[in-house]
Amino acid sequence: MERRSALKNIGGLFLAPSLLSATVEKSRKRVLRVAHLTDIHLKNELGAPGKFVKCLHHMQQQNPKVDCVLNGGDIVFDMNKENLATIDAQWKLSHDIMKAECNMPVRYCLGNHDIWWNEDDKGQALYGKRYSMDQLQLAKPYYSFTQNGWKFIVLDSVHLDIDDTWYIGKLGDEQFNWLQNELATTDASTPVLVVSHIPI
C-alpha cells in the first residue's frame, strides 16, 4: 500500500502544474529550461554521429537557452551481450562527440542498453552497471540534484530478472526506500522532476 501511495504522489507531481497553469500562467517566470534527450543508441553507422551532432547544435541554439540536459538512457547503441572492444568503441564515440560538440551540463540516467550482461563475463569487475557508471562518473545508478530551485530525481529502473540473463523494470526495496525519503524530505513547495528510463 505504501508503494502505491508513493507512486500516486509522484504522479501528482506531474499533474499539479498543468492543473494550476490556467490560473497562474500570467504570473509565471521561466526559471529553468531543460532538454530531454533519450534513446540515442549512438553507433558509428548510418550517419548517426553526424545526425547526433546536428541535434546537439540545434539544442544549444535555442532561445531562451537550455540550462540543463537530461539524457534518459540508452546512451550507446547496445552493451547487453557485446564484447568489451565493441563497448569501448561505442563509449569512445559518445565521449568524443559530447566533448567536442556539447558545452552544456548533462545528467545521465541508465537505460537497458547501457548495461553489460554478457553471460560469459559475469566474473568481470565491470559486469552489470559498473562499466557505464564508471564512464559517467556515477557513484550510484540513482541520485538526485537541484538546479534553479527544482529538484531532479534520477531513477535506476533496469534490473536483472530472477534468472540473471535478462532485465525487468523495477526499483527494488533499497532504491524505493531512498525515493520515499527523497520525497518526504523535499519541501512541499519545491517542484520535482523524476526521470526513469523504464516507466514505473
Image (spheres, helix red, strand yellow):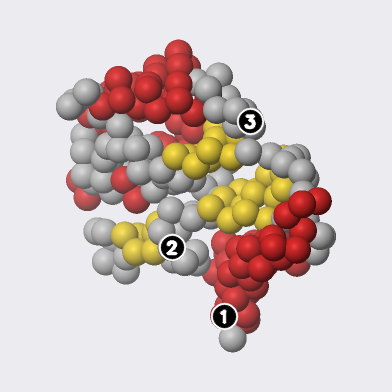
Asked where in the image residue 138 lies, by quadrant, the reply is top right
Q: Residue furthest left?
A: 46
Q: Earlier in the sequence, mark 1 or mark 2?
A: 1
Q: Earlier in the sequence, mark 3 or mark 1?
A: 1
- In the picture, the quarter occupied by the N terminus is bottom right
Callouts 1 and 2 close, C-beta under 8 Å? no
Residues at marks 2 and 3, CA–CA distance in whole angstroms: 29 Å
Q: Residue at x 37, y 21 (%)?
A: 53
Residues at marks 1 and 2, CA–CA distance in whole angstroms: 15 Å
Tell me the mark number nearer the camera, choosing from 2 and 3.
3
Q: Residue furthest top?
A: 100
* Observer able to see residue 186: no
Callouts 3 and 1 close, C-beta under 8 Å? no
The amino acid pointed to by label 2 is: Pro
Q: Which mark is residue 120?
A: none
52 with respect to 190 (left or right): left
Where is residue 81 shown, x and y percent of the image?
Answer: 21, 44
Crowd tier of the residue under label 2, counting other residues whose Cα lies within 10 Å: few below 14, some 14–19, many 20 or above: few
The amino acid pointed to by label 3 is: Pro
Residue under pointer 3: 64
Mark 3 secondary-structure assignment: loop
Residue under pointer 1: 4
Q: Earlier in the sequence, mark 2 or mark 3?
A: 3
Q: Which mark is residue 199?
A: 2
Where is residue 5 shown, x and y percent of the image?
Answer: 62, 80
